[in-house]
Amino acid sequence: MQYQWTPEFWQGWREDDNPYRQRKSARDLQLACQLLDLEHEGSLLEVGCGYGWISQVLLSLKAVHWIGVDRSLAMVKDLRKHLSHYRPRAFVADAYKLPFPDDSFDRVICSGVLMHLRDERAALGELVRVLRPGGRLVVSMNNALSPYCLPAILHNRRKQGYVQQFHLPRTYRRWLRSLGLESHQLQGDGIISTVSISAGPLSWPPRFAFNLLKSLDALAVRHLPWLAYEVWLQATKKVCDGPALM
């Protein structure tokens, strides 16, 4: 059976009673808001907005002029329905071909999406294209240095049509530099207590260890973010110098 992305799947994952998933969702939301620098007014494009679990926070900020896109019509419909009181400007669009002119947005965020695309580098270039010079890009990637990298790859091999790629953080930084961006921050969701892998009645990490692992992990990821499961990067698009005046 071909793997399908649905609002029900992602809502079930994000809002599951598993404490590790709950912690990851809360940490991801914290990182998105922190790295976007939401205190300043401006336009913001969210690529891969899904059913709106981050969007609802961004839409609640009057200074942020939010637009969201997702490849899934079901996701867009679900977001419009559940966040209708915000009158969200959400549209169906592909990350490889965004329907916006060059230099359109002050900020662009794409979280939890690029690792599920076969050509992350091409999609990243499209995000940069629609970002204005001096604008801020926030993206997340799955980390090949994470202790969960190999277990996650093996666990997901049985899912037909499922794409999940892992890269070194330096690979993404190299891509950002080649696209004309300067990387400023690298942070991580967590190292140990960020995902939970289940096999029948067994799961790792075990739920009974959550409170201990949560405290240790919060300390570890501050000092070793390059070991996180999902690494978040913040970068700024360089402003090109104009031609010299004669």
Image (cartoon, helix red, strand yellow):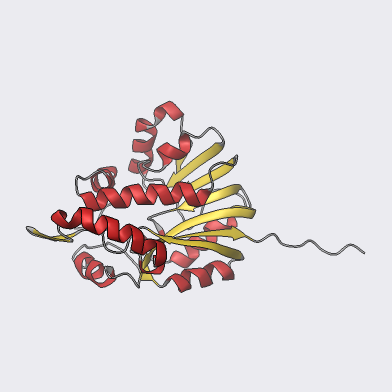
From this view, report whether residue 69 is shown above or below residue 114.
above
Drawn side of residue 44 relative to residue 74, left or right: right
- Which residue is at a point 53% across and 58% down the rendered structure image? 126
Residue 111 in the image: x percent, y percent? 41, 54
Examine the rendering and report whether any part of residue 50 can be seen: yes
Pick the front one: 238 or 124 = 238
Residue 66 in the image: x percent, y percent? 51, 39
Q: Quadrant of the N terminus?
A: bottom left
- Which residue is at a point 54% across and 32% down the rendered structure image? 62
Drawn side of residue 95 relative to residue 219, left or right: right
Q: Quadrant of the C terminus?
A: bottom right
Examine the rendering and report whether any part of residue 230 can be seen: no
Residue 115 in the image: x percent, y percent? 37, 62
Residue found at the far left of this picture:
201
Drawn side of residue 57 relative to residue 99, left or right: left
From this view, report whether residue 13 is shown above or below residue 124.
above
Residue 241, quarter of picture: bottom right
Q: How many marks?
A: 0
- Which residue is at a point 61% across and 53% down the rendered structure image? 135
